[in-house]
Image (tube, rainbow, N blue to C red):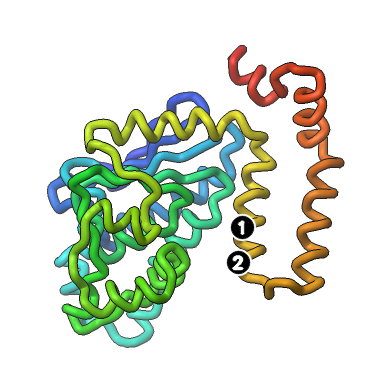
Amino acid sequence: MSQDTPVVRVDRDGPLARVTLNRPEIHNAFDERLIEALAETFRHLAEDGTARAVLLAGAGKSFSAGADLNWMKRAAAYDEEQNRADARALELMLRRIDECPKPVIALVQGAAIGGGLGLVAACDIAIAGEAAQFATSEVRLGIVPAVISPFVVRAIGPRQARRWFLTAERFGAEEARRIGLVHEVVPTEHLEARGREIVAEIVKGGPEAIAEAKRLVRLVETMPQGGSILAEATVAMIAERRASPEGKEGIGAFLEKRKPAWIAGAEQA
């Protein structure tokens, strides 16, 4: 692939942004360029008022097969501070996907290994093709899945993480669904269509409410359960949403048996 070829491609279809990892010749393996490009792509999408949802996919046979061998060779010569900077860049990329105010849907075909599995875990919704394969293979290289671990453990829980982090075995799409890493398994040729069906449901919701719903999940999972701080935070959130222009429009549309402005406006566009 030429250095001029973008390693991340963004295609727009109305409110949908399709983000494609574009290194198919090496199964969309990570290196510094891909990590930086993904981080910047999601920074822009977070600020894009016309984007309502994001499909994240990989070009070619695989979603992402993990680390690029040439990148690993370079990293082997890094000192501790260079390694920290490298890891911070990866964490920033995953966090920007996780915190993107637009729902992000992973379409997973082929391999999702190491950092590729971390990408899946950072997305809001994940759909896997029937032949998809997953692994956290780091221990076989004498390292650990440290940076991806907050996202993966949140998705599958500590008990399952112990199993897969320690054995580094590959597992298939149905096992990924069983442990909570992916939400659905479909024939690989139906991945795109199923992703677009989910986007069609997402855009029926209020854009601000959807962003707040994502924030709500993070709030509930990070605050102590049963305490007054969490209770007050949730009370404040619903009060603010009911009083907001979008909340008033949505409730009003429901009571008046009409489509809310965010749907009606999109249909007229």
Marks 2 and 1 in Cβ contact (< 8 Å) = yes
Which residue is drawn at the image coordinates 58% and 48% (left, top)? Answer: 101
Q: Residue furthest top?
A: 268
Q: Which of 47/178 is in front? A: 178
Quadrant position of residue 263: top right
Q: Secondary structure at mark 1?
A: helix
What is the x, y in percent for residue 210? Answer: 63, 43
Measured along the vertical axis of the image, is residue 11 above or below residue 126? Answer: above
Q: Mark on residue 217?
A: 1
- The residue that mark 2 highlights is 221
Mark sitting on residue 252: none
Residue 172, by quadrant, is bottom left
Amino acid type of the residue tagged 1 in the rendering: Val
Quadrant housing residue 194 = top left
Residue 211 in the image, given as x and y percentages of width and height: 63, 46
Foreground residue, 32 or 3? 32
Please name the residue shown 23% across and 45% down the image. Answer: 109
Position of residue 14 relative to residue 230, above or below, is: above
Residue shown at 28%/72% (left/top)?
164
